[in-house]
Image: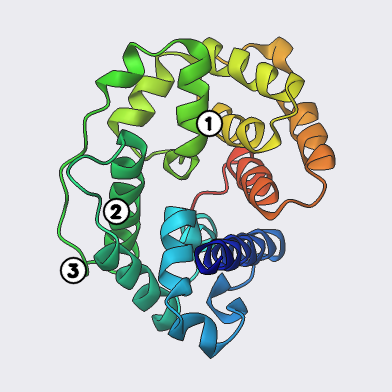
Amino acid sequence: MEQSGTSTLLKGAVQDLAAGVASALRSGGHGPAGDLPSAAFAADGLAPAAVRVLGADYVLPHVLLGTRPDPAELALLRRAVETYPPRADAAPTVAWSHWAMTRALRRLAPGEAAPAPEPAADWLDTADWRTLTHQLAILAPLALPGEDSAVARAARRRPVDVARGFVRAVRRRDWAQAAGAARWLTVLDGVPDTLGLDTGLDFVELMGDGDPLVDLQVRAARHLRVGALV
């Protein structure tokens, strides 16, 4: 029962953080650190755990809008990176998510984190288009223009497969996967013109029905669509 309660609290904390990021992207304002619910939130250890789940997107407004991170945000990101390193047997998406967080910390606070070697990504080259889209949606924080990684290179080699995966996710009403795939499609060349990505983003946002995680990815995709990376 206690574990279930903690899981529920963590899920709510992640949604709160995602809502803060989406709000910052919407308004062009400062990042989400000021939107943390309370001091008890941080004291309970939920804050770094929530940041670990959300990943590098915790500081996405600063990356896209060129704003200056609050020291509290950097401290929380650093704490999440240090507290939750991937285990040796971690899934590839977990290893890549941690790598993306480390890269974000190094980008926003040079000298705060040592460069880390990229995890392997050859598993994406052998994945079918359904699996590829599922995995890329999980790794949506890596979808940034001008940012290179083995995951991004794998995605660039298969834009049609990602487009197929986006359509499938929409048809299956998997709005989180559709939003993550759409974000990747905004930074890939060779996406079929017939896809209608802008209309698709509007539809995903509507059907996502206010889900903060979906909203975050839709708003990120729109910023990337207009070349908002500073």
Earlier in the chain: of badge 1 and badge 2, it is: 2
Q: Are marks 2 and 3 in contact (CB under 8 Å)?
A: no
The residue identified by callout 3 is 111
Q: Is mark 1 on a helix, strand or loop?
A: helix
Residue 111 occupies quadrant: bottom left
At which x and y percent is residue 62?
A: 49, 63
Number of residues whose C-alpha sits closer than 10 Å to that of mark 1, classed few (under 14), some (14–19) or many (20 or more): many
- For marks 2 and 3, give the CA distance: 11 Å
- For marks 1 and 3, give the CA distance: 29 Å
Which residue is at 39% across, 39% downward?
146
Residue type at mark 1? Answer: Trp
Q: Quadrant of the N terminus?
A: bottom right
Residue type at mark 3? Answer: Gly
**Vertically, is 171 above or below 36?**
above
Q: Give whichever of 217, 81 is nearer the camera.
A: 81
Number of residues whose C-alpha sits closer than 10 Å to that of mark 2, classed few (under 14), some (14–19) or many (20 or more): many
Residue 147 occupies quadrant: top left
Q: Which disc number belongs to residue 103?
A: 2
**Vertically, is 8 above or below 93?**
below
Earlier in the chain: of badge 2 and badge 3, it is: 2
Asked if residue 129 lies left or right of residue 98, the reply is right
Q: Is mark 2 on a helix, strand or loop?
A: helix
At which x and y percent is residue 43?
A: 44, 86
Q: Give whichever of 37, 112 is nearer the camera.
A: 37
- For marks 1 and 2, give the CA distance: 18 Å
Earlier in the chain: of badge 1 and badge 3, it is: 3
Q: Is residue 6 something one can see in this rendering?
A: yes
The residue identified by callout 1 is 184
